[in-house]
Image (cartoon, rainbow, N blue to C red):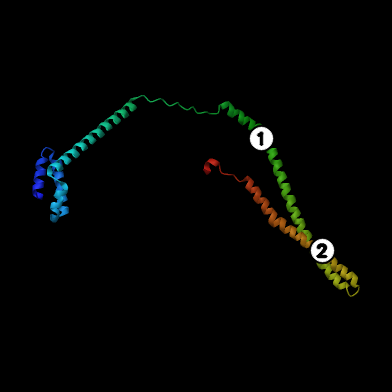
Amino acid sequence: MNRSDFMNQLERLLLNISPTEREAALQYYNDYFDDAGPENEKEVIEALGNPARVAENIKRDLQENSETRAKASDRALVEYGKAMNIQSQPQPERPVEKKTEMPTWAIVLLAVLLVLASPAILGVSTGVFGVIIGILASWFAIIFGFGVAALALFVATFILVIVGIMCIPADALVGMGLIGCGLLCCGIGILFLMLTVAMGGIVTPAVCKGIAGLFRKKPAKGKEN
């Protein structure tokens, strides 16, 4: 048996199926022979077996496919019927949410209380503001006082050292004493100068930064998330 005999027998055995399915099956086996090549024709026929067995396999596969499609169609109809039944059933009404609004009398009462309490609130705020101003004024006065004291001590140091040097030829003990007092004034002046720099350049900015951090609004937890 060659390829032509095999295909002719297979075509006769498939006459009882639809033309479309028959042509598809014959085209499939023709392509199978073409891919194998003429030199492998006998090997292909031996591998496929007789045309009757091939035709039986084709018909069995077609029958199984048709049954599968029928089951899928029946399943789709059942699902569609369930969906239609669910849609036809009356849906429960959602409860209407009532908006809670503040009554008019409460708004009027709150406005009256704010008007009556405004003098007390203004007095407290004014007092607090005055205390803060007083503390700030005292703080800067202390810094200014330390600066002036340091400057005065440096001037006294200069005067005492000059006078002490001038007094050494006449009375060396007095001259050395004046120079020593001048150096002592210089040390105290340096101490006051360091306090002025520390309070004005380090402590004051740190305090202002801390106060600003206290009054800075923190973001809400809901917004951060």
Q: Residue at x 61, y 28 (%)?
A: 109
Q: Is residue 87 above or below residue 23?
A: above
Q: Secondary structure at mark 1?
A: helix
The residue that mark 1 highlights is: 118
Q: Which residue is mark 2?
A: 185
145 is higher (above) or lower (below) than 80: below
Q: In this rendering, which labeled residue sits more in front, label 1 or label 2?
A: 2
Instruction: Report the front residue among 91 and 86.
Output: 86
Quick check: 81 above or below 183?
Answer: above
- Could you say which quadrant of the image residue 194 lies in? bottom right
Kindly identify the amino acid type of the residue bearing the numbered disc 1: Ser
Label 2 sits on a secondary structure element that is helix
Residue at the (16%, 53%) spot, across then down: 36
Q: Residue at x 68, y 38 (%)?
A: 122
Q: Is residue 88 left or right of residue 96?
A: left
Residue type, label 2? Cys
The 10 Å Cα crowd at callout 2, few under 14, some 14 to 19, many 20 or more, is: many
